[in-house]
Amino acid sequence: MGKPASKRAVRESVFEGLDRLFHERARLALLTALAARSEGVLFNDLKETCALTDGNLSRHLQCLKEAGVVEVWKSAHRGRPQTLVRLSSDGRRRFVEYLDLLEEAVRQASAASRAASDDSNKKGTAGDLGRGLAPA
Amino acid sequence: MGKPASKRAVRESVFEGLDRLFHERARLALLTALAARSEGVLFNDLKETCALTDGNLSRHLQCLKEAGVVEVWKSAHRGRPQTLVRLSSDGRRRFVEYLDLLEEAVRQASAASRAASDDSNKKGTAGDLGRGLAPA
């Protein structure tokens, strides 16, 4: 660990560092389902687990595949085509990094909320705000 | 606390419960900055803290104001117009709820990643996947 950065710089870097590829909430659900199963998940099971339509799941998988985060495998089972999806090892590493950063973001946001709440309770400043200000 | 829901149901409800209004990463930064300052933050300070342009910040604030999450106040300081933004009490309550849910989502995703990683290390299954499957 190096020197601690200023509070403002830390906050900026945490939020800006959150990879948009993982951050959308359906992606978060999708990647969590895949992260739990290193052997991969069948397309239809994934669809059901994440409550997504065929089209939505396909679009998310296309993006994640292009980014090298998931692998999509095709096969046939009793003559019916099957699709297996799994996290790539690079995808797993990047997802875990994203989760670490998100955890830090939540920690900072919760600390900020709690600190201000304590402050407000102590000072009772809630009513002072309007002085000299008009609602827009 | 009632009966524990099934693992699948819990996972679905956590991710689906994440309010999109708060989830975008610039919004997360913005709301964290506001949550830390119950007295409110001037528009220009907020812009700098969150590294947003005038236009982007205005658009985010418009959405959050319409949803009742922030209040936007106008005044003049030495003849210059000033804009003060603060979280509404309802906005603070909803943001804290969102953070609790996000914390739970991160916890579940991290647990899923760790469990699968342990599993994979034990069984060494990584190479078994390709059997009978062709990359798409």
Image (tube, coloured by chain):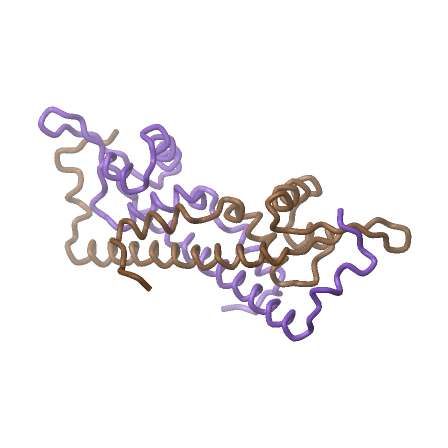
Chain colours: A brown, B purple
Q: Residue furthest top?
A: B79
> In the image, what residue occupies the spot 65% across and 49% down?
A51
> In the image, what residue occupies the spot 75% across and 65% down?
B128
- Report which quarter residue A117 is drawn in: bottom left
- Residue B130 position within the rendered picture, expressed as x and y whole percent measured from the top left: 77, 59
- Residue A97 position within the rendered picture, expressed as x and y whole percent measured from the top left: 48, 57
> In the image, what residue occupies the spot 43% across and 56% down?
A101
Number of marks in the rendered image: 0
- Residue B23 position within the rendered picture, expressed as x and y whole percent measured from the top left: 45, 46
Q: In the image shown, does A93 or B97 lie closer to the viewer?
A: A93
> In the image, what residue occupies the spot 85% across and 52% down?
A76
Q: In the image shown, does A125 or B15 lie closer to the viewer?
A: B15
| Horizontal side, residue A135 vs residue A131: left or right | right
- Residue A14 position within the rendered picture, expressed as x and y whole percent measured from the top left: 38, 51
| Horizontal side, residue A133 vs residue A49: left or right | left
Q: Residue furthest front?
A: A2
Q: Residue furthest bottom?
A: B122
Q: Residue furthest left?
A: B78
| As drawn, A38 above or below B135 | below
